[in-house]
Amino acid sequence: MATIEISGVSKIFKDAKRKADVTALDDINIKVEKNQFLCLLGPSGCGKSTLLNMIAGFEKPSSGTVTVDGQLITAPGSERGVVFQQANLMPWLPVWENVGFHLLLRGGQKAVRRETAQRYIDMVGLTGFENHYPSELSGGMNQRVGIARALLMNPQVILMDEPFGALDEQTRMDMQNELVRIWQEHQGTIVFVTHGIDEALTLGTHVAVMSARPGRIREIIPLDLPRPRDITSPQFNEIKRHVLDLLRSERTKPSLETLDHS
Amino acid sequence: MRQIVAMLRRLDRYVVPVLILAGWEAFSRSGALPAALLPAPSTVAWAWADWVFGTDGNTQTYSGHWLFDMLASLSRVLAGFAIATALAVSVGVAIGWSRTVEVIIEPTLQTLRPIPPVSWIPLAIIWFGIANKPAIFLVFLGAFFPILLNTIHGVKTCDRNLIRAGAMVGGGNRQLLRFIVLPAALPSIFAGLRIGIGSAWMLTVTAEMVAVKSGLGYVLWDSYYFLRYDLVLAAMASIGLLGFLSDFGIRLVMARVLHWQRNTTIQSGES
Ligand SMILES: Nc1ncnc2c1ncn2[C@@H]1O[C@H](COP(=O)(O)OP(=O)(O)OP(=O)(O)O)[C@@H](O)[C@H]1O
Ligand SMILES: [Mg+2]
């Protein structure tokens, strides 16, 4: 339950060797209110991960500020759970230790860690894989371990970077429903990066559509659709058409990122 | 049929050693060289048996003395290796983790490193006298650098994203070191330990030839003066055996500690 404020944030990656600085983000202003579910939608390379990393505290803006509940973000912290684009699990720990990693660092008793982890393992549908190692699981299963690890901290802010990218359609829909259920139950502010339009419109209370190079926010669209959302309903398609238009006008612009897409 | 094939397959590793020994035996008995210059494997085995068990006293003062000589060498190896491991791992982690520490001590260490440990022998004798200490010091020098370099490498190549994940779940610097960097560096550290134990045996034997009056290396050198080449060979074989066994021990520990790597490497396909 926290408010995220991103004001005037730009990010320039200096590349001394190639003498070509990349402006990944340019003057981003977003305010995510308590209990909002913001989906960041945009083409590959538009700076979605970079923006998320700055809220997480992994990277610092070149200019501008990111605050959570008025606190300036300068470092990562467990009140902001992150689900990474790649799962980033500890390969030497079994699934349950990875899920309970937060408790391990806090010096929790083994039995308590095991029991707490089990709840979240069941939640993401990995019951029976507690003692497997990440190398013994599929990419999608690893991703779910990463989700369980972040949820276990019961964070006020959840930052997710294409967490369902590696999942099949069926599992993805299950996980989406589960995520919405968790969000409705526990409350909390979610920033969710995706490049799936349907996914963004199914999950979010808001969608921020981004454009690439330099990364900018084109429009923040509030979604007042009833839940569970019907992706075949006329309202849904109307918004989808609008989003598509935004992205399409982006693509006709002759620039580097059209090369990325080909 | 299949069982016979399986049995033969298991024998395949013995083919080359057996052929070498058989050829060597035949060559020695042929009389092409005087028997004293190249003792046959059977003669070596005979001397070795007496050295170990005191069977017929053919090795004279060394008869039945093998366990004592072996333990003398082994204890030097273990002592020097243990000190080297403790120091190299902690210094290596510090250098790999902290840029400041790296700048302060790495240049010095890199200058000391190319000096062959053997060339420290004169100083080691002056400082520590003729006894265990100079040998342990040499063993330490030989094992320290491979372990150090591998530890530094292991720490530096730790995936930044894992550190981020650790910081995200609330880890401070010390916890990140203890729970992420160290485990991530372990495969490298073990690689260093395996190189280090090899150097440790090499330097124990060298030290024993020059600066100590006991151990397998001393027996080897002493037998050379007495023209007992069978005993020289028995000592060489003993050193080889112990070197192999200590490496095997490290590999056993490694297999236990790094069991999570089972399914991720080429090696895992073997067993
Ligand atoms: N550490 C870095 N150093 C230099 N440039 C970077 C770095 N990280 C990202 N960039 C650049 O910033 C831009 C945005 O990258 P980012 O990873 O945020 O994109 P994204 O929107 O998450 O893309 P995707 O959907 O493919 O994950 C890219 O052009 C990338 O080349
Ligand atoms: Mg990304």
Image (cartoon, rainbow, N blue to C red):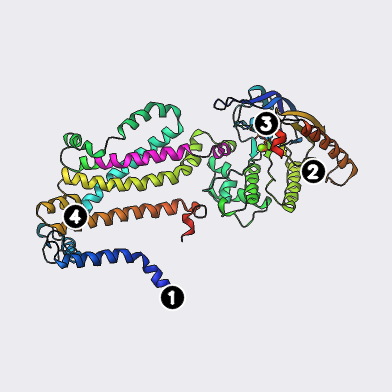
Q: Distance from label 1 to label 2 (Cα)?
A: 60 Å
Which three-letter amino acid code belongs to the residue tagged 1? Gln
Magenta stretch in the rendered image: B138-166
Tell me residue B209's x, y (percent).
Answer: 17, 46
Mark 2 and mark 3 residues within 8 Å of each other at the beta carbon? no
Residue A250 located within the stretch drawn in magenta: no
Classify mark 3 as within 8 Å of ligand 1 or not, answering yes or no.
yes
Report the chain holding disc 4.
Answer: B
- For label 4, the SS is helix
Circle on res. B189: none
Provide the residue designation for mark 2: A198
User: Is A183 left or right of A141, judged from the image as shown?
Assistant: right
Provide the residue designation for mark 4: B68
Q: Which callout, 1 or 2, points to the residue nearer the camera?
A: 1
Which three-letter amino acid code belongs to the residue tagged 4? Phe
Report the chain holding disc 3.
Answer: A
Disc nearer the start of the sequence (1/4): 1
Q: Residues within 10 Å of mark 3 (few under 14, many from 20)?
A: many
- Which residue reaches farthest front? B32
- For label 2, the SS is helix
Tell me residue B237's x, y (percent).
Answer: 23, 57
Q: Residue at x 67, y 53 (%)?
A: A125
